[in-house]
Amino acid sequence: MTKLRELIRQVRACKTQSEEKAVVARECAMIRQSFKDGDPDHRSRNVAKLVYIHMLGYPTHFGQMDCLKLIASSKFSEKRVGYLGLTQLLDENSELLMLVTNSIKNDLNSKVKILRTMRMLTDLTQPLAEDVSDVLAQVATNTEGAKNAGNAVLYSNPDVRVDFAVTSRADGVDIDASFHSQKTLTDFILEAAVPKYLRLTLEPATSPTVQPDATVTQKLTVTQTTEPAKPIMMKLRIRYVSDGVPMEELTTVNNIPTA
């Protein structure tokens, strides 16, 4: 089964649109077969690949049910990917809206902390957001809102905080990302992906190690490639090792302000 990184590498190696379509069609066929076989071991990986395929502009609605299965998982890592997948693959006409609503309510009423997952709910379709608004209000003081990045804390968990300082340009934005931690984090990597109508340049971080009371920085440049300009957004993956344990976090950045 192809890993997400391998799929991205294959897509980037394509020299023509037809080659890219062939790669995506082959990958989607394998993902469909895996879903049909009920393979739980690769479901999370397959949904993550569908999110990337969706960002490329290809149809991915067939992954909605497996996103729901991930949300129902007792593993936070799978639940997180499930919610992330639904923010991209679900639409307001989906017959799964009621099932998704019930899953959200169950998570909100459970004793398990899922505050990082709730960050993703702000991107769900409007009818669903309205249906669960009364439940969300009960935890509003403990959850984070949508990530509209200007000069803001983009992402935070007990290990690391990521800040974005955005400078607007006529054709895009320059972003100075800074990483902070109260403990030593090693093998720190920030990866980003943007829609096809944007071009992203990601410079290396100043250090692969984030230490207490020291700031690691990284520069990102996002440029519009179409007219008129479209909203600037990106998906981020943050990887690092904390106390010897490899960690991986996913987050979405929406509505980055432009000039």
Image: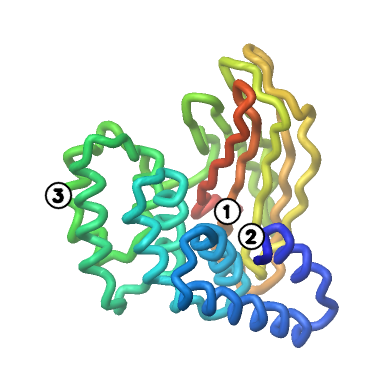
Closer-to-camera residue (259/41): 41
Q: Is residue 8 above or below residue 22?
A: above
Closer-to-camera residue (177/43): 43
Count of numbered tags: 3
Left/right placement of residue 151 relative to residue 69 reads right
Q: Is residue 243 above or below residue 57?
A: above
Residue furthest out toward the bottom: 18
Q: In this view, does 225 lie above or below 147?
A: below
The residue at the point 36 percent across, 73 percent down is: 91
Left/right placement of residue 220 relative to residue 41 reads right
Disc 3: which residue:
134
Pointer 3 local density, CA inside 10 Å: few below 14, some 14–19, many at least 20 = few
Residue furthest out toward the top: 213
The residue at the point 60 percent across, 71 percent down is: 53
Q: Where's residue 35, x and y in %?
A: 47, 73
Q: Where's residue 165, x and y in %?
A: 61, 36
First along the sequence among labels 2 and 3: 3
Q: What element carries label 1?
A: strand
Residue type at mark 1?
Lys
Which mark is on residue 194?
2
Which mark is on residue 235?
1
